[in-house]
Amino acid sequence: FWCRVGKKLYVKNSWSGAARAGIAPGMEVLKVEGKPAARWFDDRVATLRDTIGFSTDHHAEAFGLHWGLAEPKGARVDYVVRDAKGKQRKRTVSFDRASFVASGPAYPPEGLKGDRDVTYGKTANGFGYIHYRRCRSSIPYRTDDALKALGNVPGLILDFRANGGGGFSHEDLMGRFIPPGKEIRFAKRYGSRGEASYGGPIVVIVDGVTRSAGETGSGMFKEDGRAYMIGPTPTAGMSSSKKTLDLPSAKFQLYVSVRSNKKRFNGGRGIEGIGVIPHEIVPYDPKDLAKNVDTLIRKAEEILADFPQGKVPYRPEKYGWKK
């Protein structure tokens, strides 16, 4: 997987054939098959857009940085990369069978528990961490399990990167992050729910492949005043109601968005074609990646240590929360 930092492209993760070929996280990608990397990548995204529908430019780019790098089994691709010492290296990757599905965090905290949908644990600095990979109907109850295990942590990171969507009760999930017997009334009213609700500060992380229900679920924490949001880009911007239209030939149908979900988001413009825009855009740092450090998690910890209350209406101490 790659990431874009400014106009440059860097290796975000490396495994399997790429790792064996000597391509490491944090390396700058200079050339692909003899072409400047930026030109090669722009051409690749343009090809993807001929066959796949994207609601935003940043979603198309994020898709290209993950799934879009895949090649057929047996293909060989030549790269020129620049390592952390500034030296250019020629590398050839032989593609084999491997997963190209974006998993979300570049480097999650060690020792996480849970399953493919919801994982949880603590960062090295003691902050709570929950990664929501999918938004199945059970995630409020899975959140109960996570919060019971984490206890009264000094701050909590909710990571929605690469969340592929699904369907669930937003009120049930938000209620897990409101102290017992309390409610919030900022953009929308929510009451406390669950067996182990958490009332402390929260930072939400998203990216350009946070999609559909992942956008509404993560977005409510920002738009409805409960948490501070960061990400390298806005979310994908593909969350809407659709309609199927029969075409006159009767041989084809047209499947189109007719109404954006969460119309109250983005000042009444909704999500479709925009995404949920973080409070703060935080690009990956190649120096972090070279050390197997996730820049977004590191930044979230810094924010939790000195929380920007002026940008988040919810104030933990007013709701009875104590460290």
Image (cartoon, rainbow, N blue to C red):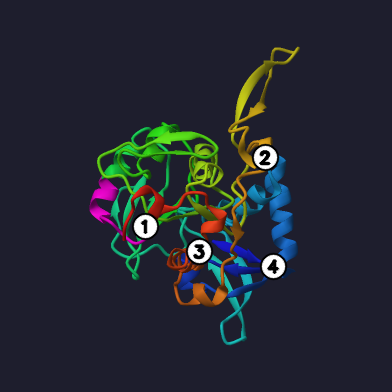
User: Of callouts 1 and 3, which one flags the residue occurring earlier in the amino acid sequence?
Assistant: 1
- Give the number of the disc on residue 267: 2
Residue beneath disc 4: 6
Instruction: Tell me how far mark 3 sits from mark 2, CA to CA.
Output: 26 Å
Instruction: Tell me how far mark 1 sits from mark 3, CA to CA.
Output: 12 Å
Q: Position of residue 2 (x, y in %)?
A: 58, 63
Q: Position of residue 136 (x, y in %)?
A: 39, 35
Residue beneath disc 1: 129
Q: 8 or 82, which lies in front?
A: 8
Mark 1 secondary-structure assignment: strand
Q: Amino acid at mark 1?
A: Tyr
Instruction: Tell me how far mark 3 sits from mark 4, CA to CA.
Output: 16 Å
Q: Which region shows up in magenta?
A: 145-155
Q: Disc 3 vs disc 2: which is toward the camera?
A: 2
Q: Position of residue 145 (x, y in %)?
A: 26, 45
Q: Quadrant of residue 87?
A: bottom right
Residue beneath disc 3: 296
